[in-house]
Image (spheres, helix red, strand yellow):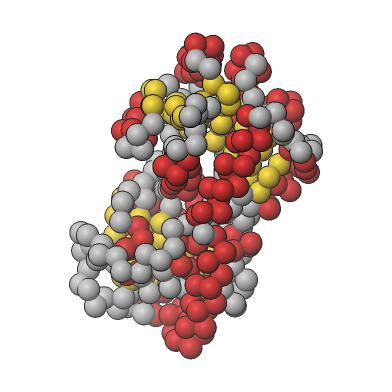
C-alpha cells in the first residue's frame, strides 16, 4: 500500500511538544510516511522513531540568517519529494513553513501548542503577532491542544472556526507498576514535591521556588524536585542559594523517567504563567499525584478548583505556597482530589488523539478539508 508522505517541522523542542510529536510519529507510521525536519541537536531524538530525519538549522527564535537557510532547505525538500502535507508545530515553525508551503503548493497544517506571547514573556511577541495576522490565511488548517488556544486563534488572528480542530494531548494510561525513578538524592521515605517543565520564563519556576521557601519553613521534612532543563537553569539555581533552600531543592535536568518520578511525588506543582494545555498535569493526575497549578491558559480546562486539583493566580508565590500547604496537610481533601482527578484523566487516552489526528491528515490529503 502506498503511504502518503508528510513533512513534519519541529523547532528545538522539549517537554510537551517533543512528547506530542514523538507520539504522533510512533503511532501513525503504519498510515503515513513521515520525514522530520528538526535542529541538528535533536536528530537522534526523532531517529529513534524509525522515521526519516533531516537536520535543518531551525531556531526557536527569530534568526534571519538561519531562518532563510532553513526556508531554502525546506523548499528543496518539498520540491524534490512528493510530499502531500507539511505539518508545522508551533507559531515559529508556522511562521517559517507557511510561505514555503505556499511557494511549493503543498498544503500546510499547523499545530498550536502554546500562547504566541508565552504569557507576555516572549521578547518578539509584537512582531510575531503582527506577522501571524498576515500569514494566518496561508495555513490550510490548525490543530490546537486546548479550547483556549482555539479561541485565541479566532479572536486574536481572525482564523475561521471551520479551519480549526481541537485535539488535546493524549497520555498513556494504565502504567501503574513503574520502576522506581533513578538517581534521586533523597531517601525513599522522604516526602517529595516537584514540578516538571522546560526552564523558560513562561513556566514560572521562580514562583515555585519562592513558594518552596515558605512551605519548607512550615514542613521542614519536605524535599523538592525541579525536573527539566532550559536557559533559566543557572539563574534558578542561584535563586535557590539566595533563598537558602539549595539543600532542599534538586535540579534533576531532562529525564526519561518522568512517569516514575510522578508516582514518587506527594504533590505536583505547575506554576506556569502560560500553558497551552499541560500534558504533565494530566500525567500526574493519572498517576494519582495531587496537583496545584496556576489558572493559566489550558490548565483551567484540566483542573476544576477544589475538585480535580487546586488553582491559584499565576505569578503569585504566596497563593501557590498556601495551596501547596493545604493539600500537604489535609489528607482527606488530598485523597478526594486524587480520586476525582484520576477519573478525569481517563478522558485523555492517547488513542483518541491519534485517531483524530489521522482523520485530519486524511481529510487534508484527500482534499476534503475543511468539511
Q: Nearer the viewer, residue 208 or 113?
A: 113
Name the image quarter holding the C terminus.
top right
> How many numbered marks appear?
0
Indicate the quadrant where residue 221 lies: bottom left
Frontmost residue, 274 versus 12: 12
Residue 62 vs residue 46, the one in the foreground: 46
At x 44%, y 27%, the residue is: 35
Residue depicted at x 50% and y 54%: 350
Residue 285 place in picture, x, y as percent: 48, 68
Quarter location, residue 130: top right
- The x, y position of residue 15, in whole percent, is 43, 47
Q: Is residue 129 visible?
A: no
Can residue 141 be seen in the rendering of this structure?
Answer: yes
Is residue 26 found left or right of 339 in the rendered image? left
Taking 344 as reference, is 269 left or right? left
Task: Identify the residue at image location x=34%, y=30%.
Answer: 43
Relative to 102, is 320 on the left or the right? left
Residue 65, percent from left and from top: 49, 15
- Residue 204, horizontal then vertical, whole percent: 50, 54
Name above or below for residue 232 compared with residue 243.
above
Q: Residue at x 57, y 64 (%)?
A: 347
Residue found farthest to the front:
1
Amino acid at each position: 500500500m502506498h503511504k502518503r508522505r508528510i513533512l513534519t517541522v519541529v523547532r528545538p523542542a522539549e517537554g510537551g511538544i517533543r512528547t506530542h510529536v514523538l507520539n504522533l510519529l510512533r503511532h501513525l507510521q503504519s498510515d503515513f510516511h513521515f520525514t522530520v525536519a528538526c535542529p541538528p541537536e535533536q536528530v537522534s531524538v526523532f531517529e529513534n522513531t524509525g522515521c526519516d530525519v533531516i537536520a535543518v538549522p531551525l531556531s526557536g527564535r527569530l534568526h534571519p540568517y538561519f531562518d532563510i537557510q532553513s526556508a531554502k532547505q525546506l523548499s528543496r525538500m518539498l520540491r524534490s519529494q512528493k510530499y502531500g502535507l507539511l505539518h508545522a508545530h508551533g507559531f515559529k515553525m508556522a511562521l517559517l513553513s507557511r510561505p514555503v508551503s505556499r511557494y511549493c503548493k503543498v498544503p500546510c497544517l499547523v499545530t498550536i501548542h502554546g500562547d504566541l506571547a508565552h504569557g507576555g514573556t516572549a521578547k518578539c511577541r509584537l512582531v510575531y503577532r503582527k506577522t501571524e495576522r498576515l500569514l494566518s490565511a496561508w495555513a490550510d488548517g490548525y490543530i490546537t491542544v486546548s479550547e483556549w488556544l482555539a479561541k485565541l486563534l479566532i479572536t486574536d488572528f481572525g482564523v475561521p472556526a471551520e479551519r480549526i480542530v481541537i485535539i488535546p494531548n493524549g497520555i498513556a494510561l494504565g502504567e501503574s507498576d513503574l520502576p522506581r525513578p533513578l538517581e534521586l538524592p533523597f531517601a525513599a521515605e522522604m516526602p517529595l514535591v516537584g514540578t516538571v517543565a522546560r526552564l523558560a520564563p513562561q513556566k514560572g519556576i521562580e514562583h515555585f521556588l519562592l513558594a518552596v521557601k515558605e512551605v519548607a519553613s512550615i514542613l521542614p521534612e519536605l524535599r523538592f524536585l525541579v525536573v527539566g532543563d532550559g536557559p533559566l537553569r543557572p539563574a534558578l539555581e542561584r535563586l535557590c542559594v539566595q533563598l537558602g533552600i539549595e539543600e532542599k531543592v534538586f535540579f534533576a535536568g531532562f529525564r526519561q523517567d518522568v512517569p516514575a518520578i510522578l508516582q514518587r511525588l506527594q504533590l505536583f506543582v505547575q506554576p506556569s504563567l502560560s500553558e497551552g494545555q499541560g500534558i504533565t498535569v494530566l500525567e500526574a493526575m493519572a498517576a494519582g499525584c495531587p496537583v496545584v497549578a496556576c489558572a493559566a491558559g489550558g490548565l483551567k480546562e484540566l483542573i476544576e478548583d477544589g475538585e480535580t486539583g487546586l488553582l491559584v493566580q499565576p505569578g503569585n508565590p504566596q497563593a501557590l505556597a498556601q495551596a501547596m500547604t493545604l493539600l500537604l496537610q489535609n489528607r482527606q481533601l488530598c485523597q478526594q482530589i486524587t480520586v476525582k482527578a484520576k477519573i478525569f484523566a481517563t478522558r485523555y487516552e492517547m488513542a483518541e488523539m491519534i485517531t483524530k489526528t489521522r482523520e485530519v491528515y486524511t481529510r487534508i490529503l484527500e482534499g476534503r478539508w475543511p468539511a
